[in-house]
Image (cartoon, grey):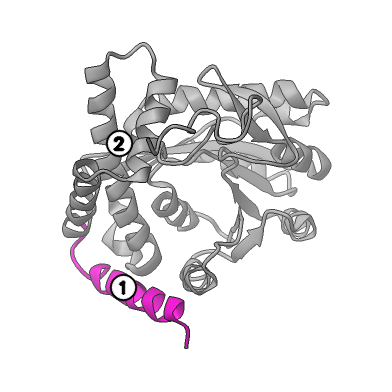
C-alpha cells in the first residue's frame, strides 16, 4: 500500500466523520480553516491576492485586502460544503436551498436533446450540483478532468455516484454525445485556465485562455445551454437558472465565448468573495506562461 493511499484514505475518513456533524458546525469549521489560510502566508493566498488586484483595480488596497480575507474564508466554507455534498445526507441541507428559474431547465429537456448546465467555479458548486440533482427525474453527468491523485479521484467518483450517473472526462466526446442522446443533463464548468483548444478571451478585461469546447459541443449536439449560478447567504443557498443561451448555436465561436465570459463576470461581481480566486485563471498569457504570477515567490 502506497504512502499516498494511506494519507488520502486517512483524510477521507476524517472528512466522512466531519460530515456527520450538524451542518452549521461543518460550515463553521470550514470558515475557521479559511481564516487560518488568511492568517498564514501561503501560495494560494498570494494567487488570490494577485487575481483580486488584477480584476478589481478600481478597489483601494484596503478594499482589495478585505475582499481577499472574505474570499479565503469563503473558500474554507466551500471546502466544508464539498464534504457535505459528498458524504452527508440530503435532508441535512436541501431545505436550505431556494430554486429559481427551474422552468428553463424543464423546457430545455422537453426538446429531448439533453442539456448543458453551464456555470463557473463558485464555492458552492459541488453542494449546489447535488441539490439540483435532487430536482431532476434522471441522473445527470459531470464533465471534468481526472484528478492527479487517483486514490482521491476514486473516493470522489464513488461519492458523486450517489446522486449522479458518473463523471465524464472532458476529452471523452463520445460519452458526452451519448448522454445528450439519452436526454440527460451534463454539468460543465469551463472557466479555468486552458492550454489547448482555446482562445484568449477577455475576462475582467484580461486575456484568459478560454476553452472552445462548450460552443463546439452545443452546436454539434444541438443541446440547450442553460446557465445556472448558486450563491450562499447566512447558511442558505439560492440557485438561479437563466434562459438558454441561443448564441451557442452560432458559427461565431469567438463572440460566443466573449458573451460567456461576460456572463460569468457579471454573476461573479454579485458576490466576488465566493469565486475561486485561488486558481491561476490567467496562467497562460500572450506574453508567456505565468507572466502575471511570475514574482509571487519573491
Whether residue 61 is visible to the viewer of this picture, yes or no, is yes
Q: Residue at x 64, y 32 (%)?
A: 209
Residue 204 or 43: which is nearer the viewer? 43
Residue 266 image point, x, y percent: 47, 22
Residue 90 image point, x, y percent: 35, 63
Q: Which residue is mark 1?
A: 16
**Badge 1 or badge 2: first in the primary sequence:** 1
Residue 140 or 277: which is nearer the viewer? 277
Q: Residue at x 63, y 30 (%)?
A: 288
Residue furthest out toward the bottom: 1
Q: Residue at x 29, y 22 (%)?
A: 64
Whether residue 275 is visible to the viewer of this picture, yes or no, is no
Apparent side of residue 283 relative to residue 26 in the rendered image (left or right): right
- Span of residues in magenta: 1-23
Q: Which residue is mark 2?
A: 71
The 10 Å Cα crowd at callout 2, few under 14, some 14 to 19, many 20 or more, is many
| Residue 93 included in the magenta stretch of the image | no
Residue 21 image point, x, y percent: 19, 67
- Whether tag 1 and tag 2 are in contact, CB under 8 A, the answer is no
C-alpha gap between disc 1 and disc 2: 25 Å
Judging from the image, what secondary structure is the residue with disc 2 in?
helix
Amino acid at each position: 500500500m502506497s504512502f499516498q493511499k494511506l494519507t488520502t484514505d486517512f483524510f477521507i475518513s476524517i472528512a466522512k466523520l466531519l460530515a456527520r456533524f450538524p451542518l452549521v458546525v461543518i460550515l463553521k469549521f470550514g470558515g475557521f480553516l479559511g481564516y487560518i489560510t488568511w492568517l498564514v502566508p501561503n501560495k494560494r493566498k498570494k494567487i488570490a491576492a494577485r487575481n483580486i488586484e488584477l480584476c478589481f483595480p478600481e478597489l483601494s488596497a484596503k478594499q482589495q485586502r478585505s475582499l481577499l480575507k472574505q474570499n479565503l474564508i469563503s473558500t474554507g466554507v466551500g471546502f466544508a460544503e464539498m464534504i457535505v455534498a459528498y458524504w452527508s445526507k440530503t435532508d441535512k441541507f436541501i431545505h436550505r436551498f431556494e430554486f429559481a428559474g427551474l422552468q428553463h431547465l424543464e423546457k430545455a429537456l422537453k426538446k429531448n436533446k439533453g442539456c448543458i448546465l453551464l456555470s463557473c467555479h463558485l464555492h458552492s458548486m459541488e453542494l449546489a450540483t447535488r441539490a439540483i440533482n435532487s430536482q431532476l427525474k434522471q441522473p445527470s453527468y459531470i464533465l471534468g478532468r481526472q484528478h492527479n491523485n487517483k486514490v482521491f479521484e476514486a473516493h470522489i467518483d464513488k461519492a458523486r455516484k450517489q446522486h449522479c450517473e458518473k463523471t465524464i472526462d472532458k476529452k471523452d466526446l463520445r460519452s458526452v454525445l451519448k448522454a445528450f442522446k439519452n436526454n440527460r443533463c451534463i454539468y460543465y464548468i469551463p472557466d479555468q485556465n486552458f492550454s489547448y483548444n482555446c482562445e484568449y478571451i477577455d475576462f475582467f478585461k484580461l486575456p484568459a485562455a478560454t476553452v472552445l469546447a462548450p460552443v463546439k459541443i452545443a452546436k454539434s449536439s444541438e443541446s440547450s445551454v442553460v446557465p445556472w449560478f448558486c450563491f450562499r447567504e447566512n447558511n442558505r443557498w439560492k440557485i438561479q437558472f437563466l434562459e438558454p443561451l441561443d448564441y451557442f448555436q452560432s458559427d461565431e465561436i469567438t463572440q460566443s465565448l466573449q458573451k460567456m465570459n461576460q456572463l460569468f463576470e457579471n454573476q461573479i461581481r454579485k458576490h466576488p468573495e465566493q469565486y475561486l480566486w485561488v486558481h491561476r485563471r490567467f496562467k497562460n498569457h500572450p506574453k508567456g506562461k505565468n507572466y502575471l504570477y511570475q514574482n509571487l515567490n519573491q
